[in-house]
Amino acid sequence: MRRRAALNVLKAWLLLALLAGAFGGLGWLLGGYATASIFAFCVLLAALAVYAYADRALMGMLGARPYALAEDPILSSTVERLSAKADVVPPKLYLVSDGFPRAFSAGRGPRGSALAVSTGLLGALPPAELEGVLAHELAHIRSRDVLVQTFAVTLAVSLVELSRIGGWLERALLFVLGPIAAAFVHVLLSPRREFAADREAARLSGTPHGLTDALLRLDQAAELVSFEASPATEPLYTINPFEQEGLARMFDTHPPLGERVSRLRGLDPTWGERRDAA
C-alpha cells in the first residue's frame, strides 16, 4: 500500500513536470525564455489550484452537495468506522440527488478528500453492500489513487470541454483532443488499481462478499437506469457506468467486472463449498 501511494505521488509529479515542460517549450517558441518562464509558472499555479480545490470542483460539476448528518446518520458512522480502520481522515461527504446508484471520491489522499454517494446508491444497496462500496472508495483514498484520478479526470474533462469552444469545428477538435485526453488517463491510471482497492475493501469490511454483491447489483442497475455525465469522469466511479461505445469507450479504465468478481470470491476459499452445499 505504501509503495502504491509513493508511485501515485510520483505519477502526479511526473505529470506536472510534463505539462510544465510542454507549456514552457511552447512559450520558448513564442517568445523566448521570459515567455517560457511565464507559461511554466502558470502551469504550476494551475496544478496548485487543482491540488487544493479540484475535489470541490469535481463534486460541483457532478451535481454533488454537502451531505447533512441528519439525512442518514448510519452512512456517516460507517464512513468514520471504516476510515479509522484504513487510517485515513474521514472524507467530506457529499450527496448526489440522482436515481443512478454510484459512488466516487476525489481529493489529495488520506489527509484531505471527498466522497460522494447518490440517493440511488443509498436506496439500492443493503448495509453490507454499501459498506463494501464505501470501503472500496476509502481504499482509493488511502493509496492516493484518488490524487492521480483527480488530476487525470480534471485534465481530461478540461480537454474534452475545450473542444466545445470550436463552434462548427467542435467535432474536429473533439476528434483530436478526445484521444489525447484518453491517452493521459490510460497512462496515469492502471486497471490494477481497482483490483488492489477491491482487496483492501475486503480487508476493511471483513468480507469480500459485500463488495462483490454490490458490484453485481450496480452492474444490473446500470442497465435499468439512465445515466448522463462527461465520459472523461469514468475513472472516478466504482464500476464503469457508461455504454461501451464512442467517446466513452476511450476512457474505460476499469477491468472486466467478471474478473473483479472472481478475484473477490477467491479471497474466501470456503465460498465455493458453501455455495455448492446450498
Image (spheres, rainbow, N blue to C red):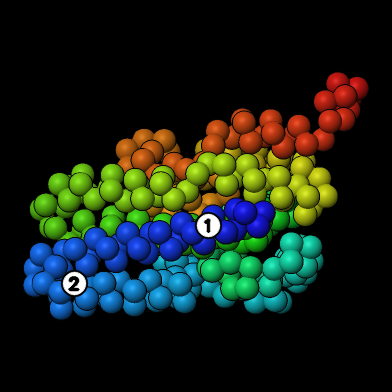
Q: Which residue is mark 2?
A: 36
> Regarding mark 2 in the picture, which secondary structure is present there?
helix
* Residue 50 falls in image quadrant: bottom left
Q: Position of residue 63 (x, y in %)?
A: 46, 66
Q: Is residue 276 above or below residue 138?
A: above
Q: Residue at x 35, y 46 (%)?
A: 182
Type of amino acid at the residue the image marks with label 2: Ala
Which residue is most to the top?
276
Query: Looking at the image, which is closer to me, 33 or 233?
Result: 33
- For this view, does 161 lie left or right of residue 58? left
Is there any visible trace of residue 192 in the rendered image?
Answer: yes
Q: Residue at x 53, y 68 (%)?
A: 107
- For this view, does 239 lie left or right of residue 37? right
User: In which quadrant of the rendered image does the C terminus lie?
Assistant: top right
- For this view, does 252 lie left or right of residue 156? right
Q: Could you say which disc has been placed on residue 104 in the image? A: none
C-alpha distance separating marks 2 and 1: 28 Å
Which residue is most to the front?
33
Type of amino acid at the residue the image marks with label 1: Asn
Q: Which residue is mark 1?
A: 8
Task: Choose the circle earlier in sequence order: 2 or 1.
Answer: 1
